[in-house]
Image (tube, rainbow, N blue to C red):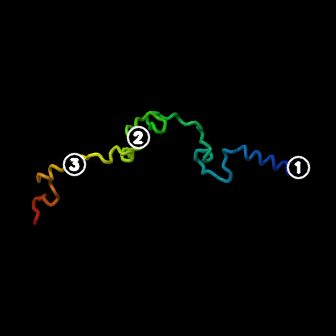
């Protein structure tokens, strides 16, 4: 091994130790320096997350009355097969319901 080979190996080691520097990238003048993408940025530790905003299914404190997803009531059978309230059925049966054809506007020509 010659001395030129050992010097090139030493240079290769120094390139790997400078992992924050992006090789071949020139940043515009006046811009703030930033870390290499995927390196975790300047602050590698993020702020702790508020546990009250995380659902119980993910290990947080946010209560989920029907399950881990809002459609779990449909999937688990809590809704299927149950009676549904027909809010407008009384109006339809008694003829009190207003349909689009029943409405008359002022100045309307029939």
Position of residue 3 in the picture relative to residue 59 (left or right)? right
- Looking at the picture, how far across and down is residue 1, in whole percent? 89, 51
Position of the C terminus by quadrant: bottom left
- Looking at the picture, how far across and down is residue 29, in whole percent? 60, 49
Query: What whole-number distance in Å separates the C-alpha atoms at marks 1 and 2?
Result: 68 Å
Q: Is residue 66 above or below residue 3?
A: above
Residue count near mark 1 (Cα–Cα under 10 Å), binned few <14, some 14–19, many ≥20: few
Local SS, label 1: helix
Residue at (62% x, 44% y) in the render = 39
The numbered mark at residue 3 is 1
For disc 2, the marked residue is 67
- Looking at the picture, how far across and down is residue 87, in whole percent? 20, 47
Q: Front-most of 7 and 55?
A: 55
In this rendering, the label closer to the viewer, 3 or 1: 3
For disc 3, the marked residue is 86
Mark 2 and mark 3 residues within 8 Å of each other at the beta carbon: no
Mark closer to the chain start, 2 or 3? 2
- Looking at the picture, how far across and down is residue 54, in whole percent? 45, 37
Residue at (81% x, 48% y) in the render = 9
């Amino acid at each position: 091994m010659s001395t030129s080979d050992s010097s090139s190996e030493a240079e290769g080691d120094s390139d790997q130790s400078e992992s924050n520097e992006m090789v071949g990238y020139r940043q515009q003048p006046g811009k703030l320096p930033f870390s290499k993408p995927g390196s975790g940025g300047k602050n590698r530790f993020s702020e702790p997350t508020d546990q009250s905003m995380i659902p119980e299914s993910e290990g947080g404190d946010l209560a989920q009355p029907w399950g881990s997803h809002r459609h779990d009531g449909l999937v688990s059978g809590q809704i299927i097969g149950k009676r549904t309230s027909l809010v407008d059925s009384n109006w339809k049966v008694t003829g009190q319901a207003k349909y689009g054809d029943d409405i008359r506007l002022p100045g309307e020509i029939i």
